[in-house]
Image: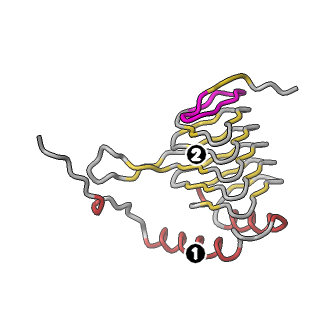
Amino acid sequence: MDTPSIELLKSNHKKSIKEVVIRILWYLLWKSLASWTPRFCNVWRIFLLRSFGAKIGTKVLVLGGVWVDMPWNLEIGDFSAIGSNVWIYNFAQVTIGRNTVVSQNTTLCTASHDYSHPHMTLYWKPITIENQVWVAADCFVMPNVVIREGAVIGARSVVTKDMPEWMICAGNPCKPLKTRVIQ
């Protein structure tokens, strides 16, 4: 039997010159002028995100240390919060609903590699986090996931598939555990 061969050098994602220039400009501006800023500089961080195409509602909080790979692929609804050191790796669209919290150190990852392809080609699919959701600290959300309205994702969960509405979900892989009740 022949041993399969992986050729990572042939796995390249073609980018236009315009995309490369915009991404470099975004990186330099965000890292030097925004990501390290204290909490009270939220208006400045929101301004920069919107300047690069992010659609952000009113009264949104984006804390310091957040990294958004491609702000033009980001939408955040009114009254939502993104905690410190959240990484939004958004080759595809990331949509975060209203009254939603994505807590610190969470990663929203829209891209991965096709491990069955000899070049391990990159692919990307959107992530949608609906209204009134709480994604607790240090979670990892995979490409092509929808977290339905009112769900709570427990700390350190790995979300590999859609989560149902108004459920407490946790684990690796994340699973629905019980109904979320608001008293």
Does the magenta segment cover residue 169? yes
Q: Would you name the residue on which mark 2 appears?
A: 140
Mark 1 or mark 2: whose residue is earlier in sequence: 1
Residue shown at the point (57%, 40%) measured from the top left: 158
Magenta extent: 162-175
Quadrant, the C terminus: top right
The residue at which mark 1 appears reads as 25
| Identity of the residue drawn at 67% across and 59% down | 85
Q: Where is residue 128 in the image (x, y as percent from the top left)?
A: 61, 41
Q: What residue type is labelled 1?
A: Leu
Q: Residue furthest left?
A: 1
Foreground of the two, 84 or 26: 84
* Residue name at image x 42 percent, y 65 percent: 15
Position of the N terminus by quadrant: top left
Q: Does the magenta stretch include residue 18?
A: no
Q: State the residue in front, 62 or 93.
A: 62
Where is residue 50? Give x, y as percent.
70, 63
Query: Disc 2 residue type?
Result: Phe
Q: Quadrant of residue 74?
A: bottom right
